[in-house]
Image (cartoon, coloured by chain):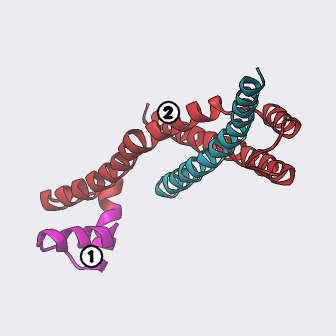
Amino acid sequence: MSERLEEIRRTVAELEVQLATVEGSVAALKALLAEDDGEGAAEGKEVS
Amino acid sequence: MAREIRKAARDTGEDVAAHHGLVKMIPQWERGVRAPRERYRLLYLKIFQGRVLGDMSQGMELAVDVAPRVGEIRARAARLPGAEEIRALEADALAKPRGAMTAAEIRALTAETISRLHEVADNLAKLAALLDDEDDEDDTTDEGES
């Protein structure tokens, strides 16, 4: 059981790192879009 | 078992028979030919209690420490976008005027994210199998006891 418990712990730790990486990357992609929207909106205001 | 009895006896300062004596006596006790004296019964109890407590502490560790983390991981994984959705984000980001990142960087980030997403899926499947094995082991033990 202890070997399996160790394997579970290792997999859980790996998943926590992988999830943080994916969440960070998705947030970066979304931020890029939000940034573009923000710039577009700001530009729109200046024109009007 | 003889070695374990002698070790348990050493730990508690008990006098017990020599190894070869125990090797002769233990099969007789186990077959019910002779009854072990009280000090040997107590040493048996000590050995098996230690084993049971060891298993229990690992089971408790799994329940107390690992199980909440597994629940959190599954919840976080369920909130992640799928590969299609990430590709759509990439397409939107590429279609818009770029600020902080170049097109190549956006593509690289998307590829890396999808690759990591596959790793998450693989590890979730591995974890589910490991946890299923735990349940199967418990079921087997229950059946064995009944």
Image height of A8 relative to B76, above or below: below
- In the rendered structure, the answer to whether residue A27 lies left or right of residue B91 reads left
| Residue drawn at x 28%, y 72% as measured from the top left | B22
* Chain B drawing hue: red
What's the chain of the residue with tag 1?
B
- SS of the residue at dot 1? helix
In this picture, residue B29 sits left or right of residue B84: left
**Is residue A22 at least partly visible in the picture?**
yes
Quadrant including the C terminus of chain B: top left
* Disc 1: CA contacts within 10 A as few (<14), some (14-19) or many (>=20): few
Please determine whether, in this image, residue A13 is positioned above or below residue B59. below
Which one is in front, A20 or B72?
Answer: A20
Residue type, label 1: Gly
Residue B143 tag number: 2
Q: Chain of mark 2?
A: B
The residue identified by callout 1 is B21
Q: Which residues are magenta?
A: B1-27
Q: Note the chain letter of the cyan one.
A: A
How crowded pointer 2 is (Cα within 10 Å; few <14, some 14-19, many 20+) is rated as: few
